[in-house]
Amino acid sequence: MEQDELMSSPFVDDGEVSKMFVYPEPVPQLNTPGRGPKENNEQISQPLKVYLRVRPFSKNEIANNESQDCITIEHSEMVTLQAPKESSAMKNSEKGIGQSMHKFTFTKIFGPDTSQEEFFEGTVNDLVNYLVDGKNALVFTYGVTNSGKTFTIQGTPKDGGILPRSLDVIFNRIRGKNYLKMNFKPFLSSHVMKLDDAQVKQEEALKASILASLKEDTYRVLRSASQSSLHSNKSSTLSMTQPGELELSENLISSNDDAISKCLYSVWVSFCEIYNEYVYDLLDVFSSTKQQKRPVLKVCDDQAGNSYLKDLKWFNVSSTEEACKILKIGNKNRSLASTRMNQQSSRSHSIFSVRLLRISDDEEPCVLGISEMSLCDLAGSERCTKTDSVGDRLKEAGNINNSLLILGKCIAALKHNQNLKMKQNYIPFRESKLTRLFQPFFCGKGKACMIVNINQCASNYDETLHVMKFSAVAKEVVQTINPRVLEFLTPKLVGKDGKSIKVDPNTSIEDLLSDEDFLEDEEELDVMALSQEDALIKITNLREKLLAERQSKFVLELQIRKEIGEEMLQQLVDLEETWSKRCEGLKETYEEQFEDRFEMYKKAIQKHAHNCALEEMEDSHVPVEELEAEKEKVKDRDRRILELEMALNLPRKPEELSFFNSTEIAAVTPASGSLQRTFFSCPATPPDPRSRDNEDDIYTVQAADRQNKEMASLLEDSKKQCMEKEEQVNFLRLQMQKIEEERDQVLRKLKEENQSMQREIQSAKHLLDLKDQEIEGLQHCRKRVLELENIVLDFQEEQNESRKHTSNPDSQPPKPKKGLFSNLKATVTGSPRSGHGKIKDKPDEESSQSSSRKRSKLSRKLKE
Ligand SMILES: Nc1ncnc2c1ncn2[C@@H]1O[C@H](COP(=O)(O)OP(=O)(O)OP(=O)(O)O)[C@@H](O)[C@H]1O
């Protein structure tokens, strides 16, 4: 397949292309009878084969009323599921969510009565032939716990499952062509290691010891079971020739058997399990005891991107019996546990693999091809609550569910990616160990086939429905098988140090180029397999490579960052431009809207003002007739005033007569000439005595005039009084100012006097304190003097006494000495010494009196 073709393959995402492209090249000179070159070079696309197997009820299940006709097989490809009353599906459908009945189609459905053999014939048999033809195959079972997955794969000692049957078919097909030496051993994913004699011996010893670890009787039971199953098969093409030997019937030999006859086969098996996302070698019985922790196997990728298990043990088997024995040994190490639903429930995914090496039947044999078939018994897909999982079981269930979930995701992504019109999804193969190991098969390495196991129990209905939905997705996946792997493959041959020991002339350029770095490109390098020097060189090379890689990655990262930065900047600039344009647009629209609104409001206000004015006008509107009548009235009144004034001979200004016409004026005046004279010269004309009203008015006017005059005189008087008062006020103000000035002066003087007084008081106080201190000191001295004098006197008395006693009784008493002490006392007390004798202590009253006198004198002074 060309790279372009690979790119367009629905199963290959971008990341897979390079991996698939480096599959080992086919060997053109190899004969592959029965298959034309055209067929071999074509890419095979076929839907993933999904088989359904329905397990029969057990006695217990029937007793527990588990049989409620939930599952009906319509025909060999369709099954109907009818939700029982108690199931969640039924409850949901009653609520209007989902349906109570579902139909599913499968490649083929096998009912509860299907025998193991029928099942094998209908499913895996073809794949086994496919394996012998040099191709790869994967078979995996999927279903809830207790649905019959292990039964389907392994079967019982009496009735073997697809695995022992497959082994039987393999050995029968290669019968007589078994390559007995163990010097070619599978290595990595699809390569072969050539072992030297010592290694071969070691290999043989290892095999012997592992086989010996299983009790002989078990081995016999298994062997007989395998044989009996084959005997019971009437349609079987196998027949027994001698005890312990199986022979191929003529009609089983395929068209490829010409090819088979020209080469030899070496069969190798391995058995591992994935438990809690750790891969364990089930055949690693010597390196791990029960006390020790089991070594965990690493999932690695080889140069071609195919995953393989590092350090996985491969055992060469020369018969089905040996292989079954190894299976049995592995089963002993399997993680099984008793759950509520299954007494012997597999808590792990187990993978039993068979690798078939095709070796040339020459003097110097070489490996012509390698093919592999893996049978995977997946752990139950049930939910934790169903199995009452707690503790370790819960953890197991979590990991099982997680890996199955990822498997589901991968299958869904594969299905999605088939539609090339849609955006290709990422396939999360690397998210679990299981899918990592399955990845090559889903990406064209070989054919895959899924076996769905279900039981018919009503209590398991919801879980079963879930399994069926999962398989419905899987069934839609179209598998594309790379044509290169359809050929017999020339595996890379490596020596015991793991280095390539042969370069095939037909190997592709890519392979040639990559040969040198065969191991270096591996994800996990097995340094232990190399000599110390080689390992050191390898490490140095790797370190250099790593550094160079890091540098290049760093530069690349910088470049990418720069590019991203520039792109982001450009985006920001574009964004800014777009936004500023949008802002401008918005501004304009808002402005327009604002103007429109403003105009609208303006018009509304104008209208309102107009309406108000109209209303006001309506309110203040006076009819013309009324106005005219009012005007007439005013005129009449004015005329009357004029008449009266004329009668009083008051002067009028011409403008005051302006609103009278000449006839009116003439009416009120005897003659126009006299009117003029009246207004401007004002002669004293007596009032007309003929009118009584006139007389009254004249009097009124006169009285008013008088009043006016009186008021004017009163005003004059009050003005004068005001003037006087103002003068008085001014005078008083001046007086006030003077008084204030004097007062300020007095205050200032008083302040000064007060300050001097304060000072005097302070000094007097100080003096007083000094005097007090003096007095205290003197009193103290006085006391001391008195004490001393008393001492002296005592001494003198003693002296006198002693004198009296000694010599002169008539002698005069000695005169008291006038010395320092007596003077001091006189000074302090102010009194003369009273003769000789003991000085009497005068009362303190005297001194206190004198001091109080002094104080009173001082206070008097201060007061002054
Ligand atoms: N087709 C069948 N005919 C008769 N018995 C069967 C069939 N399938 C399964 N059984 C029996 O049902 C029981 C459960 O089967 P099995 O242990 O294979 O289930 P399982 O799906 O592997 O369970 P788990 O996932 O828990 O390992 C076993 O006792 C087995 O013998």
Image (cartoon, helix red, strand yellow):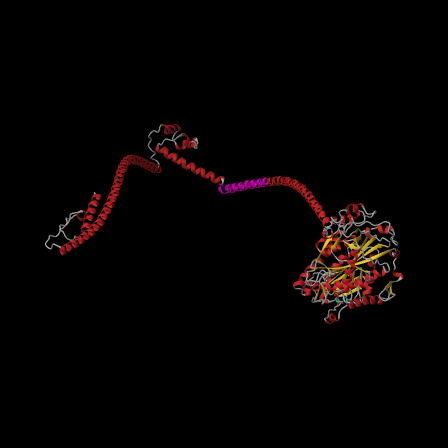
Q: Is residue 417 magenta?
A: no
Q: What is the x, y in percent for residue 590?
A: 60, 41
From the top left corner, tell me how far across and down residue 416 is, in percent: 75, 53
Tell which of 422 and 190 is nearer to you: 190
Q: Residue furthest bottom?
A: 63
Image quadrant where residue 652 sits: top left
Image quarter where the C terminus lies is top left
**Predominant secondary structure, magenta span:** helix
Magenta span has 607?
Answer: yes
Q: Quadrant of residue 594?
A: top right
Against 42, residue 653 (above or below) is above
Left or right: where 556 falls relative to 855 = right
Query: For residue 243, what is the image quadrant?
Result: bottom right
Magenta segment boundaries in residue numbering: 594-622
Q: Is residue 16 above or below residue 340?
A: above
Asked whether, in this view, residue 171 is left or right of residue 636, the answer is: right
Q: Nearer the viewer, residue 698 or 745?
A: 745
* Residue 78 appearing in the image: yes
Residue shown at 20% from the left, 48% from the top: 851
Instruction: Using the image as rendered, state which of residue 645 and residue 454 is in the foreground.
Output: 454
Residue 8 appears anywhere in the view: no
